[in-house]
Amino acid sequence: MSATAGARIAPLDTEEYDIRVQLAACYRLMHKYAMTDLIFTHVAARIPGSDGHFLLNPYGLLFNEITASSLVEVDGDGKVVGESPWAANQAGFVIHGAVLRARPDVHCSLHTHTRAGVALSMLECGLLPISQHAMAFHNRVGYHDYGGLENEHEECANMAAGLGNHNALVLRNHGLLTTGPTVAAAFITMFNLEISCKTQIDAMATGLPLIHPPDRFASTSPRPTGIAPVPASPWPGRP
């Protein structure tokens, strides 16, 4: 089926149109940087001015097939709003719905199952502030112990609690989750968290002693979004 069949076209020059374009771009960037798990992970973004509605990927499309108009709108109960040939990813609704309900300041949440992220999630030590990227997450990342899927709603509520006021979460034995006030911020945080995981796993794989920088450097490292107050944003056209 075509990705545009029965697509939802938001009016131009509206906040929803802009969010759809940003979210579709995020999915394409995740494909470009190999942060996908075929069709099984997801990114969600709030629809401004709606009553708790948000956008998810159309379940069944690869990330490089997703367009702004094919994104699926879901309500607070996980039901698809309007006409769409695609279903919403139910696991995505449960995870992101819990995060967005718990954090009114968050407008986008992003979840991955990358090789480096899953490997890091299995380490008892967690993320170490041993690289410049990782120092930005020092005392700014939450952890959530794996709880299985027996009660997914309870599990995801606990996940949101584990995130707390952070914008990054390591899901033990599972993967990674990042959030942000914009799609750009959530993606850049995940990009930096992914590099932090990759470099730590690579360094530990050598079996050689690791160099731990002084804590004072990690404590004063800039926040991991790379969005503000840096003048030149890595997400063109966004503050």
Image (spheres, grey):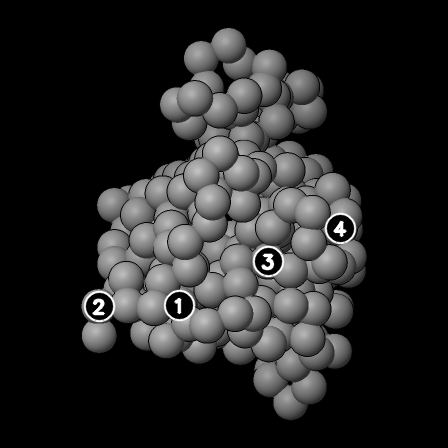
Secondary structure, mark 2, is loop
Which label was assigned to residue 54? 3
Residue flagged by tag 1: what amino acid is it?
Answer: Pro
Q: Which residue is mark 4?
A: 103
Calculate the distance from the C-alpha at mark 3 to the C-alpha at mark 1: 12 Å
Indicate which label's residue lies in the foreground, 1 or 4: 1
Residue flagged by tag 2: what amino acid is it?
Answer: Ser
Residue 99 in view, yes or no: no
Indicate which label's residue lies in the foreground, 2 or 3: 2
Above or below, 59 against 42 in this view is below
Q: Position of residue 46 (x, y in %)?
A: 61, 51
Residue flagged by tag 4: what amino acid is it?
Answer: Arg
Which label was assigned to residue 2? 2
Q: Which residue is mark 1?
A: 58
The C terminus - image quarter: top right
Calculate the distance from the C-alpha at mark 2 to the C-alpha at mark 1: 12 Å
